[in-house]
Image: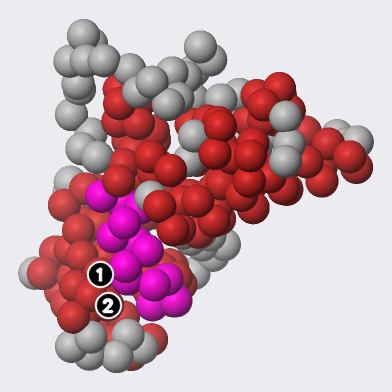
């Protein structure tokens, strides 16, 4: 079984190589089918059998494009819940964090709450699982242990832009040594809670206030 990485779902397109149009179309049909299954049935609905049946694309083509169903699942996940683009690298720490947090808030605000909950909860916890745990008979290429690994990789992918800023020399100089995970929960956690409850509109001004409170707490 091939190992899954955060880039396993990306292939020739991303390497700038010429791609056979037929292969590109097949890849898109597989991804469309997987995304629909993920949105309507959650993680465990995205099996090789279900995706190939819905897309009318052979399983060999799925493996050739994505490695295995977990690789396809990672690509479908990113299509449903896009990763925020990192800042341009110019401007002050406050300006870059404001830009990043505002764009993250836009993505959170635009994603249906039920879909977000369904997908994240379906990925399960990140803790290691019992290696003797039985493999899913519907998709022997993706056991629960691989889903746990996939969840950890997806989380890592989503936090990368924040990690890059929060561990930069500018951030250390201004904020001192801080736990990036704790900092991310302080910044993004309120946005998720606000989206779930609808307690307040998620606006650029709201994001700036959250960030100012965060910076004040870590610089005084």
Report the side of 54 relative to 95 (left or right): right
Is there CB contact under 8 Å for labels 1 and 2? yes
- Mark 2 — residue? 195
Q: Dividing the image into 4 quarters, which one contains the C terminus? A: bottom left
Front residue (pair 114, 212): 114
**Rendering coords of residue 131 (x, y %):** 23, 11
Q: From this viewpoint, is residue 141 visible?
A: yes
Real-space Cα separation, disc 1 to disc 2, in angstroms: 5 Å
**Label 2: how many residues lie within 10 Å, few (<14), some (14-19) or many (20+)?**
many
Residue 40 falls in image quadrant: bottom left
Q: What residue is pinned by disc 1?
A: 192
Say if the magenta span includes residue 107. no
Q: Is residue 218 above or below residue 56?
A: below
Q: Position of residue 126 (x, y in %)?
A: 23, 34
Where residue 130 sits, quadrant-wise, is top left
Magenta region: which residues?
109-121
Residue 122 lies left or right of residue 76; in this view the side is left
Report the residue at 29% width, 90% height from top. Answer: 201
Q: Residue at x 59, y 40 (%)?
A: 51
209 sits left or right of 66 in the view: left
Judge left or right: residue 90 versus residue 134. Answer: right
Q: Which mark is residue 95?
A: none
Kindly tell me whether residue 163 is visible in this rendering.
no
């Amino acid at each position: 079984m091939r190992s899954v990485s955060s880039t396993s779902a990306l292939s020739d397109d991303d390497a700038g190589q010429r791609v056979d149009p037929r292969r590109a179309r097949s890849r898109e049909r597989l991804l469309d089918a997987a995304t629909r299954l993920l949105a309507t049935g959650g993680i465990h609905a995205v099996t090789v059998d279900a995706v190939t049946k819905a897309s009318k694309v052979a399983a060999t083509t799925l493996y050739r494009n994505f490695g295995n169903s977990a690789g396809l699942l990672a690509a479908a996940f990113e299509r449903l819940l896009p990763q925020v683009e990192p800042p341009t690298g110019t401007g002050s720490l406050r300006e870059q964090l404001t830009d990043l947090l505002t764009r993250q808030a836009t993505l959170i605000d635009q994603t249906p709450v039920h879909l977000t909950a369904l997908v994240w909860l379906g990925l399960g916890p990140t803790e290691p699982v019992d290696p003797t745990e039985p493999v899913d008979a519907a998709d022997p290429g993706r056991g629960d242990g691989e889903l746990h690994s996939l969840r950890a990789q997806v989380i890592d992918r989503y936090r990368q832009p924040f990690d890059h800023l929060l561990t930069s020399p500018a951030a250390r100089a201004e904020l001192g040594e801080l736990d990036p995970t704790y900092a991310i929960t302080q910044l993004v956690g309120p946005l998720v809670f606000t989206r779930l409850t609808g307690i307040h509109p998620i606006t650029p001004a709201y994001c700036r206030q959250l960030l100012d409170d965060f910076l004040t707490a870590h610089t005084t």
